[in-house]
Every structure is written in C-alpha cells, then in structure tokens.
Image (cartoon, coloured by chain):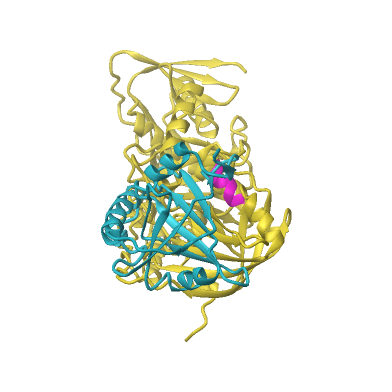
Chain colours: A yellow, B cyan
Amino acid sequence: MKRLTLRDLPSGCFDGVIPALLGTCSGDGTPNATWLSHVFLLDDRHVALSCQFFRKTRANLADNPHAQLLLVAPNSIQQWRLNIRFLRSETEGRTFELMKSRLDAIASVTRMEAVFALHSADVFEVDAISTVEVEQTEPSVPSGRSADRLFELSRLTEIIGSSADLRTLVDSGLGFLATQLGYESVGVYLLEESEQALYALATHGFPTSGVGARIELGVGVIGTCARHRIPIRIADVNRERLYGRAVREQLERIQSGAERDIPLASVAGAKSLLAVPLVLQGKLFGVLATECQRALAFDERDAQMLTTAGQLLAQSIALYRDEEPEREPEPEPPSILRAGSIQVRYYEADDSIFVDGEYLIRGLPGKILWLLLGLHQREGRTTFLNRELRLHPFLKIPAINDNLATRLLMLQRRLDDKKLPIQLHREERGRLRLTCEMNITLESVSA
Amino acid sequence: MTLSASALADLREFLCLGVSLMLVTRDERLMPEITRAAGARLGEDGLLRVALPLPEARRAVWNLETTPSVALSLVLPTTYRTLQVKGSDTHVVDWPGHEVIARRHADAFVEQVVAVGIPRPIADAFFSHGRYVTVGFTPLEIYDQTPGPASGLRVAP
C-alpha cells in the first residue's frame, strides 16, 4: 500500500472549515484533546499549528512530543489520523509570518485581533498518516464548475484580447468569470497607492454595483488580501461565524462613520469568500474577489484559477491606453435642459464630490469630474481629450503608472449608478463627452 | 474529587444536543489515538457510557484494554461550546439500547453540522453506523474548552 504524505490530502483539510483535533498525552499518561482552528501545511513532512489557546497541550508536548492530529476533508468528510512529533516553536521567520498573515486575515473579518494573536508557530514532523476507515462514506459533492479550466482560460485571453475599450474589457472579463467559470458574484478592486486604499472598479452579479466603494488596506477580507498579498479563502462563513457579522459591522461603520463612502457590493447570506491579490511587476495592483451563498464553494484550485484569470485581467487593464482620437469630434447635439438645477460641491481636502448634498465619489475621479464641470461651465465645452487630462496640472497625474483610464471608467460607472443628469461617455478612442441635462451650480469648499 | 450535581447535570444535558464527540485514548508508549464516538450518555449511576463505532475505533478499544485513561471532547458545532471530560477507569460495559441512542445522537449531530454548512448528503459520513463497542468511565474532571482566552479552565466541581 502506498505510504500517504501530506501532499496526498485534499487542500480542504487545511482550510479550517471543519476544525482539526489534536490529541496529546502528558508524561503521567493522561490524554488531552484540543480543537484547532487551523493546521498549516509546510511541506511534505511538516505541519505547523498556531499556538493560540493551548495551555495543557503545551505542557504535554514538553513532556511527550508524540501527538495525533485528526483532519477532515469538508467536501467528502474523509478523515485522516496523522501521527506527529513536536519539533520546535517559532516566534519569527517565514513560517511564523505566513501563519500570522492568515490569522490576521481571519481576525480582520471577525474583529477578534486580540483573541487571534499568534504567540508561536508550533512545528511538527509527520511520522505516519492513516485513513480513518468509516463505513458508508458517501461520494464527494461535485464542485459544479468546469474541469477543463485551461481551455476556459484560453477563451478568457481571447475575450480580453478582442476588447476594443476598457469598459468592454472589464465587463466581458468579469462576465466570463461569472458565466463560464461559475464565479457568479465577482468584483475587481484597484489600489490607489497615494491613499493606501482600494476602490471598486467594477463588479458583476451583486444586487448593487458598489463601484467606487473604498476599502482601506488591511480591512476585511479584500483589504487584508491586499495588505498581505496572499489569497484569502473563507470556505464556510457560518462555520467560522465570520462573514455575516463582519459585513454588518462594516456596513454599520460605513453608514455611521461618514457620508463619504459607498457600501461595498455584497451578496446577502454569502457563506464562501475568495479574494486574490493582483500583483504586477512586484507591486500590488488590486484584488479580484468573489463570494457565494453556498458553503464550501471555493477550494485551492479556485484560488489558483482566480489568480491566473485575475492576472490576465490586471495586465490588460494596466496596459490599456486610450490613444489619440482618429477623427474630429462630432458636432455637438443641441442640449435640452430639464427644469431645475443641481448643486455640485467639491471638497478640496479629499477631492470628494457631492451632488445635491449626496456623496458621489472622491479621489482622482472626483477631481476629474470637478475639472470637466468647470471647463464645461466656463468655456461651454462638452468634449475632452484624454491626453489633455493626462497633462492637466490640476489633476497631477503621474507620468508613470498612469491610472487615468481606470479612474474615468470608475467615474462613468458611478454617474450611471446614481442616474444623475450629468453623464460621461467615451465618445471614441481618447475622447470623452460630458452631457449635462440640468443647470449646474458649482461650489468649491477649501481644505 | 467528586463533581457537583450541577456540573454533571450540565454535562448530561450537553451530551444530548448532537455534540461532536471525540475520544482520545493512548497506548503504553504514550501515543495518543483519536476516535469519533457515535453517542454518549451520562447515567444516573454516574457512569459516562460511550458508543465507539467500528471499524474506526479498533485501536482505541485495544488501547483501553491496557490503559484506561481517556479524554472525551464534546463540541457543539453551532455554538463552539466545548467541554472536555477526563476519566481514568474506562472499561467495556454493557449498554442495552445503545443502538437507539447512537441513532438518536447521529440524527441530532447531522442537524448540527448541516446547520453550519456541511451538505446533508454527506453529513452522516463522519462515523460508521452499525457496529459499536460500548465503554464507560467515571467523569473525574471537566474543562471548559470553548475557544477564547479563557479556554482550558476547569469547571468548578
């Protein structure tokens, strides 16, 4: 019979969906049981356990390093006993930092940072693995997603390659992830380096788009994924008692904290959550995240799949440039103004825009809108070249890592979402058209 | 030290809620062995009876022939409340009607794990149903192991 190694066990065993049990024995022969929230796979022969709440366990291991671990695969309930031997406790180094990052991610969702504080990473060598023989084991639940994922990825590259503009690229990319790969609710969030925060660029399959929503680095699953640049997978929110409460708390904080925020798109009753970092040239570019109402919806293969698909999207978004327009602008259609007027207020402090007292957007998209509205009002202009925006001293867009196209898309989307009488259209490559269906009064509030 | 009537009553009630039951035994070389139990009840005679499913509990039963010390961990999946009971006189016992108790326990346990997201078609696959070895021990100590900074404190006798 083949000798089992840790690599033979499904990745779900290490997700913490079904807690593992650690059995130890004191020097005087008294057994002890301890539940573990997470078991970390280090390599073929080693696991690390997070020393969080153990008291008796630590004392037992000091007496007797031999222990047994029971792991369960959540998709099949297949179980394994691992005879393990305690080697050492680590309080720094790669293993410790990796474990700390993962626990931080969970803690950020549960708001239990103090409780989840990692004291040490306890490293064990695996001496033997045996399958628990259970009669009546049922077959595993199929994931429901396509098996031929390489083929699907090649189709995604085709779709991205054939997209004529950024909006189509992002929409068709996320749409493909939803319809062909089964990630029904998915969103892409881009880093705004100057603010150390992420903004939602586009989403698919959520009740509200949430475009423009801001997420601080380190906050929630998406912010934590970005801060640590590691995939964060919550396999069963109910089981961990994590997500519903976290979302509620986050929403409450957003609603009570300030009016300068847009609620993050979320699926009601989501149980599974997966966020992967998008890293380009060694720098964080953004996060791709998906959620699902079904528990155990994502496994390690999904993390790999979403990472690969996300990298394809991120590279295409980052490389996208709206080039020079190829023709002269169309004659401007006569503007038909509706009755009444709207007030647009711009706050210099954070470049936020409020329309009739209601928050719209902030940061670079807010600044762009303020510039366009000013030019429109002062000079009667309705069309603008991307090139002139890129060079305009008011916007201070960096020559390197130009993020104009994504911020314009975010602004367009946000204006669409709010159904305002101000709309921004991409008229053609490199040229925008601003339409205002009502009289606008502009007011700037100094910092 | 004898456990108080209230601590035992709490344990008796907790055992009936569909808790996940894990028995840790050990061999003569102090190597622990973890086994899921298929049901447990605390009798009025003070004996905690445990149904161990076969084939997966074979080694635990073997261990108990020579080393009667055990730790029984009970966790309620929907709340994470966790108790651990220690005993040192475990032995094979007669337990008339244990199959009924085991079935009742399995049904309650399935409801618990389904409530936390385990698909119902596989929720019955945690342990075998059919053949059991029944053992019993006297609870000596109870520890509250509900996750948190206070985990591991002994329940007042």
- Residue drawn at point x = 63 percent, y = 44 percent: A117
Q: Give the residues in magenta.
A: A100-107
- Residue drawn at point x = 54 percent, y = 71 percent: B66
- Residue A71 vertical position relative to residue A242 in the rendered view, above or below: below
Q: Nearer the viewer, residue A118 or A163?
A: A118
Of all residues, the one furthest to the front in this rendering is: B45
- Quick check: is B155 in the magenta stretch? no
In this rendering, does residue B57 appear at all? yes
| Residue A207 image offset from top left, x and y in percent | 31, 38
| Residue A13 image offset from top left, x and y in percent | 47, 63
* Residue A49, quarter of the rendered image: bottom right
Q: Nearer the viewer, residue B42 or B24?
A: B42
Secondary structure predominantly adopted by residues drawn in magenta? helix
How many badges with numbers are in the image? 0
Of all residues, the one furthest to the top in this rendering is: A340
- Quarter of the figure with the C terminus of chain A: top right
In this rendering, does residue A374 appear at all? no
Q: Nearer the viewer, residue A439 or A363?
A: A363
Of all residues, the one furthest to the bottom in this rendering is: A1
| Residue A233 image offset from top left, x and y in percent | 48, 53
Q: Is residue A388 left or right of residue B121?
A: right
| Residue A256 image offset from top left, x and y in percent | 47, 22
- Quick check: is A105 in the magenta stretch? yes
- Residue drawn at point x = 43 percent, y = 23 percent: A380
* Residue A84, quarter of the rendered image: bottom right
Q: Is residue A291 left or right of residue A92?
A: left
Q: Nearer the viewer, residue B99 or A79?
A: B99
- Residue drawn at point x = 67 percent, y = 60 percent: A61
